[in-house]
Image: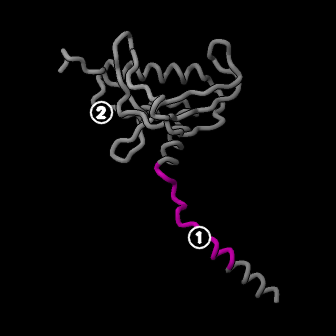
Amino acid sequence: MVNKTVLAMVSVFLAGCHEIPDAKPTEEQKFVGAFRTAFENRDVKGIESLVYWNEVPDDLKQDYLARIKAVLALSGNLPVRGVSLEPIKEESAKKEILIHGRAAELHPPATHLLRVELTGKSNFPGGSASGNVEFPVGVVDHKIVICSQVWVKTDTDR
């Protein structure tokens, strides 16, 4: 009787295992996981590998990398409470930004924000007890990437 009960329990358990066909991480889960690992390790190269650099001029690339390094330095060794990928509302998406007084735009256009929630005392002025760091994220060829920036073309550039 005991063997039949154990066999029945194992059969139910194994039948339940077949109900999980999508055990593979999604593209979003892989991206968020890779970013979180890089951020927690303060790995600039790891974050850099997730940024879309196609058509980005070197001056903007260096500026963006400097800002990534600054964020990592200011966040110190704060533990990461969570990393989430949240859709941007169309009306709140920034089309252009100013960098050193010159217009630039996100490349590719942002569809989501990658939000990093930090806890503890930071190296930010005032050393807040918690905070968020956000990175604009878009999709290129079905691949999730951190948006970089390109200069906005003016009439004289065309």
For residue 37, say whether it is visible.
no
40 in magenta: no
Residue 102 horizontal/vertical position (percent) = 34, 13
Question: Which quadrant holds residue 90?
Answer: top left
Residue at left 67%, top 13%? Answer: 126
Name the residue carrying label 1.
Answer: 19
Decide: few, some or many residues near mark 2? Use Cα within 10 Å; few <14, some 14-19, many ≥20: few
Q: Is residue 139 above or below residue 150?
A: below
| Magenta residues (range) | 12-27
What's the distance in space between the residues labelled 1 and 2, CA to CA? Answer: 41 Å
Q: Secondary structure at mark 1?
A: loop
Where residue 18 appears, as percent x and y from the top left, is 58, 72
Whether residue 156 can be seen here: yes
Front-most of 128 and 45? 128
Residue type for callout 1: Glu
Q: Quadrant of the N terminus?
A: bottom right
56 with respect to 137 (left or right)? left
Residues tagged 1 and 2 counted as in contact (Cβ below 8 A): no
In the picture as drawn, the residue positioned furthest to the bottom comes out as 1
Residue at the image point whose x is 76% and y is 81% from the top: 6
Q: Position of residue 85 (x, y in %)?
A: 53, 40
- Most extreme residue toward the front, as rendered? 91
Q: Residue at x 52, y 35 (%)?
A: 114
The tag earlier along the polypeptide, 1 or 2, is 1
Q: Is residue 131 toward the left or the right of residue 101 in the image?
A: right
Q: Name the amino acid, label 2.
A: Asn
Under circle 2, the secondary element is: loop
Check residue 29 in the rendering and tell me which mark sits there, or answer none.
Answer: none
Q: Residue furthest right?
A: 1
Name the residue beneath numbered marker 2: 54
